[in-house]
Image (cartoon, helix red, strand yellow):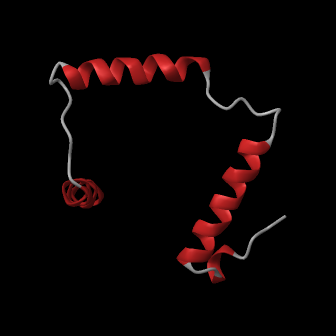
């Protein structure tokens, strides 16, 4: 199957992605949460609680990406 991505609107692309995710989540053959994922989340939560995590605003991220692309 090939989607007409170049002619789809952003809303249509997001809708298609949502439909794919919903379909994958309903598939019993797909592992819903990898075993390692819980450990990664635990480590991130611990770093957050220790104050070792730094957050960036969306605007900061956009600016960094623009600078990297230059």
Image-quadrant location for residue 10? bottom right
Left or right: residue 60 compared with residue 23: left
How many marks do you count on the picture? 0
Q: Position of residue 13 (x, y in %)?
A: 61, 70
- Closest to the observer, 67 or 56: 56
Classify residue 11 by image quadrant: bottom right
Identify the residue at image location x=58%, y=80%.
9
Locate residue 21, reporting x and y percent.
67, 51
Q: Position of residue 60 (x, y in %)?
A: 19, 55
What residue sits 25% from the left and 21% below the top? 47
Residue at image coords 76%, 51%: 23
Horizontal side of 31 relative to 1 (left or right) equals: left
Q: Nearer the viewer, residue 69 or 11?
A: 11
Which quadrant is home to the N terminus? bottom right
Closest to the observer, 35 or 68: 35
Q: Hey, which quadrant is residue 31 in on the image?
A: top right
**Vertical comparison of 40 with 9: above or below:** above
**Position of 63 compared to 21: left or right?**
left
32 relative to 21, above or below: above
């Amino acid at each position: 199957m090939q989607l007409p991505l170049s002619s789809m609107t952003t809303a249509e692309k997001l809708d298609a992605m949502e439909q794919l995710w919903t379909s994958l989540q309903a598939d019993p053959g797909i592992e819903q949460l990898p075993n390692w994922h819980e450990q990664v989340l635990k480590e991130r939560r611990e770093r957050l609680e220790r104050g070792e995590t730094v957050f960036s605003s969306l605007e900061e991220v956009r600016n960094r990406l623009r600078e990297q692309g230059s």
